[in-house]
Amino acid sequence: MEKNHDMMKTSLLQDIRKSSKRILVFAIVFLICELISRPAEILYTYLMQKKAASGNSLSFTNYLNAIQFDSLPEQIIRAVMIIASIIALIVLLSRIRKSESPFQEKHGKILQIIAVLNAAIAFVHVIAQIVMRIVYGAFEPGGLLGYFSPRIFSYWLLANAAMLYFLAWVIRYGALLQQESDETL
């Protein structure tokens, strides 16, 4: 019975390591794509803003293309948070791939960091809109609910962050149980 349990445990750990390796490759490819596309978006927005500020005529199509990526500070903040989140994911997957157990306190902490970054990314656009309205004197505190419409606020990112935070708790609890089990043996 104990031998079957150990074999099953070893087999599952090998499957987790293989899966984390596959997801790690995907995360690295995603990071490379982000490192190429985000600076390109920022550069494009900067060039369009510079062209508009210089007084050159900006075609309607170029104007629409320039505003689709949001403001420059918002893009930079979002890019930094997304890239930091992906790097944290890569670190997490690398550690899981090399560890004896996926249930470790440090894995749960990294997952919590990723969750907090994802939650913050969800609020970046809302905060940018509020700041812009305050700067231009068009902010009305009574209209705060309008900033949380599905067009402006990403509920999917917030739900993803909540799910990741919950999974981090599960991993940390599993680490505690693993530690207690190791101490009793």
Image (tube, rainbow, N blue to C red):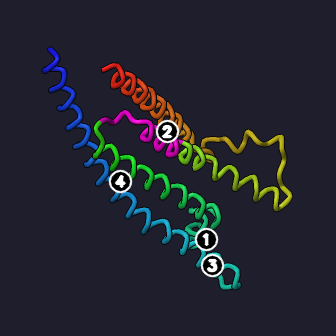
Amino acid residing under circle 2:
Asn
Q: Are marks 1 and 3 in contact (CB under 8 Å)?
A: yes
Is 65 situated left or right of 9 in this image?
A: right
Circle 1 is placed at which residue position? 63
Q: Magenta stretch: dominant SS?
A: helix
- Magenta residues (range): 101-115
Work out whether mark 2 precedes mark 4 in sequence or the reverse, and give the earlier one: 4
Depth order, front residue of 83/141: 83
Q: Residue at x 53, y 61 (%)?
A: 79
Residue 184 pos. (x, y %): 34, 19
Amino acid residing under circle 3:
Leu
Work out whether mark 2 precedes mark 3 in sequence or the reverse, and give the earlier one: 3
- Pointer 1: residues within 10 angstroms few (<14), some, or many (20+)? some
Please give the label number shown on residue 79: none
Depth order, front residue of 159/3: 3
Circle 3 is placed at which residue position? 58
Work out whether mark 4 precedes mark 1 in sequence or the reverse, and give the earlier one: 4
Please give the label number shown on residue 160: 2
Of helix, strand and loop, which one carries label 4?
Answer: helix
Name the quadrant of the N terminus: top left
Q: Residue at x 60, y 41 (%)?
A: 150
Distance Cα–Cα, label 2 vs label 4 = 17 Å
Work out whether mark 1 precedes mark 3 in sequence or the reverse, and give the earlier one: 3
Please give the label number shown on residue 27: 4
Residue 55 pos. (x, y %): 71, 84
